[in-house]
Amino acid sequence: MILQILGAAGAGKSTLGTLMARQTGLPLLHADFYRWQDDQFEQMRPISVRRAMLAQDMACRPSFLLDGGLSSWLPEELLQPDLLLLVRCPQKTRMERLAQRERNRYGQDCFSPLHPHFQLTQEFLEWAAGYEQYGLEEANSLASHMALLARTPCPSLILWNNAPPETLLRQATAFLQML
């Protein structure tokens, strides 16, 4: 079984994925792991490397949870999820979470123009803020995620992240049990 969790940056995909992995025993794969070469999120892996890494992991793990989307670099027919979860979250909450995450990763002064990661932080937050406005041309947009849910033959569930993570876990688990 392949369960894929989609959503905007800061929506709670990784948190929900971690809780679901703990509860189900399924391994959790992170889309960002395949995309980025470094933990500073500065250097992308070549697409051929991403695809090879994912293919190897999928061969070893026929069932898994996937945190994030791959559609910008992986043809849809190569990943056939059995369940899609879309985690939604108010933009203000997401942006607050992302700002705190940037501070945790790069230091409290990462919003200072003198900080070496300042420009990348600003670009990332600007990109993340556009999730609801971007169209289908942006793979990580609400429009793209809704289109994927509409055309994918597997069951899907939209979870609104305005409750504790354990509540989202209960909702996702209840949906899974109905299948």
Image (cartoon, rainbow, N blue to C red):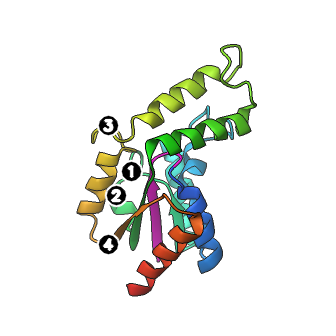
Which stretch appears magenta?
1-10
SS majority, magenta: strand
Residue 9 sits inside the magenta stretch? yes
Dot 2: few (<14), some (14–19), or many (≥20) neighbours within 10 Å? few
Residue assigned mark 4: 154
Secondary element type, mark 1:
loop
Residue assigned mark 1: 71
Residue 54 sits inside the magenta stretch? no
Dot 1: few (<14), some (14–19), or many (≥20) neighbours within 10 Å? some
Determine the residue positioned at 57% across, 63% down. Answer: 164
- 3D distance between C-alphas at marks 3 and 1: 18 Å
Secondary element type, mark 2:
helix
Q: Check contact, mark 2 vs mark 4: CB within 8 A.
A: no
Residue assigned mark 2: 76
- 3D distance between C-alphas at marks 3 and 4: 26 Å
Give the answer, above or below, for where 69 lies relative to 179. above
Foreground disc of the pair 3, 4: 3
Three-letter residue code for mark 4: Cys
In the rendered image, residue 40, in percent from the top left (x then y), is placed at 67, 35
Q: Check contact, mark 4 vs mark 1: CB within 8 A.
A: no
Three-letter residue code for mark 2: Glu
